[in-house]
């Protein structure tokens, strides 16, 4: 699994900001919009195609992409959608997995891709799959984890292989309901929204993310969806087993 991006919607550095983190010399403080790339022996997929998707795909030299899974339709998660055409071209089309609500937004914003009128081979041909429960990509089962994100509900995902809970990905959430925490208990890697130290109406703070991790007791916790107020160096203040993810970080599961 590769972290393609670990930033909140503004990216880090933020346009026109002179703060310490935006001028940091630590390359890990340069963050593109949040997304992960998952490779398995059978297939590969991305979760979200944000504004920086093309840059991320070039950086990581992504040659294989069999499907795309969406958490929700905020612009920082969907604005790279059209760049999927490079993969769609090779496959003939590309499967898109999203909740009914997110799919509705994708179909509205990218109407030209979904209406099927342009059959030019270089054009994006998405094949919608509405998520209504757990589904499989190759040998991996993906269970949607509906979590509150301010006033909306978005999907996190739990990846399970051979009965092992490998990853829970909760990139955007303002709370993790008890039932979801229970469902992901003991997961190998918890990837969780931890925007900054100060509370925020639609994202977890560092303290809140740590509280969730204490309930879930994962093998390892990695924070994502970071804003410029949180320096990579502040990872040193966190407990063992808790870290801040950064762009390009790869983990073997
Ligand atoms: Zn800044
Ligand atoms: Zn969002
Ligand atoms: Zn977001």
Image: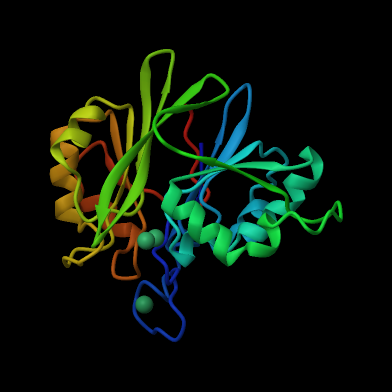
**Rendered residue at 43%/13% (across/down):** 162
Judge from the rendering whether residue 109 lies leftward or rightward of residue 194; answer left or right.
right
Residue 11 position (above or below residue 62)? below
State the residue lying farthest toward the right: 120
Front-most of residues 139 and 56: 139
Front-most of residues 116 and 22: 116
- Rendering quarter of residue 19: bottom left
**Rendered residue at 38%/14% (across/down):** 163
Q: In the rendered image, which quarter contains the C terminus?
A: top left
Judge from the rendering whether residue 117 lies leftward or rightward of residue 199; answer left or right.
right
**Rendered residue at 49%/60% (across/down):** 105
- Rendering quarter of residue 12: bottom left
Q: x, y percentage for residue 35?
A: 49, 51
Front-most of residues 200 and 130: 130
Q: x, y percentage for residue 115?
A: 69, 57
Residue 101 position (above or below residue 136)? below
């Amino acid at each position: 699994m590769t972290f393609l991006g670990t930033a909140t919607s503004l990216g880090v550095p933020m346009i026109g900001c002179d703060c310490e983190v935006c001028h940091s010399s630590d390359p890990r403080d340069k963050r593109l919009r949040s997304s992960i790339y998952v490779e398995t022996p059978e297939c590969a997929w991305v979760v979200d195609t944000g504004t920086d998707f093309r840059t991320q795909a070039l950086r990581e030299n992504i040659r294989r992409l069999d499907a795309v899974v969406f958490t929700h339709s905020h612009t920082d998660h969907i604005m790279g959608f059209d760049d999927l055409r490079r993969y769609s071209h090779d496959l003939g089309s590309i499967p898109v997995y999203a909740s009914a609500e997110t799919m509705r937004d994708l179909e509205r914003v990218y109407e030209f891709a979904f209406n099927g009128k342009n059959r030019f081979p270089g054009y994006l041909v998405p094949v919608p799959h509405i998520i209504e429960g757990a589904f499989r990509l190759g040998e991996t089962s993906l269970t949607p984890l509906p979590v509150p994100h301010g006033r909306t509900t978005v999907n996190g995902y739990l990846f399970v292989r051979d009965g092992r809970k490998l990853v829970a990905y909760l990139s955007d959430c303002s709370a993790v309901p008890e039932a979801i925490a229970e469902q992901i208990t003991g997961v190998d890697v918890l990837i969780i929204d931890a925007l900054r130290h100060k509370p925020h109406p639609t994202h977890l703070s560092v303290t809140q993310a740590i509280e969730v991790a204490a309930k879930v007791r994962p093998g390892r916790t990695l924070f994502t969806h970071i804003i410029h107020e949180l320096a990579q160096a502040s990872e040193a203040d966190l407990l063992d087993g808790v870290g801040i993810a950064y762009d390009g970080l790869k983990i073997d599961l």
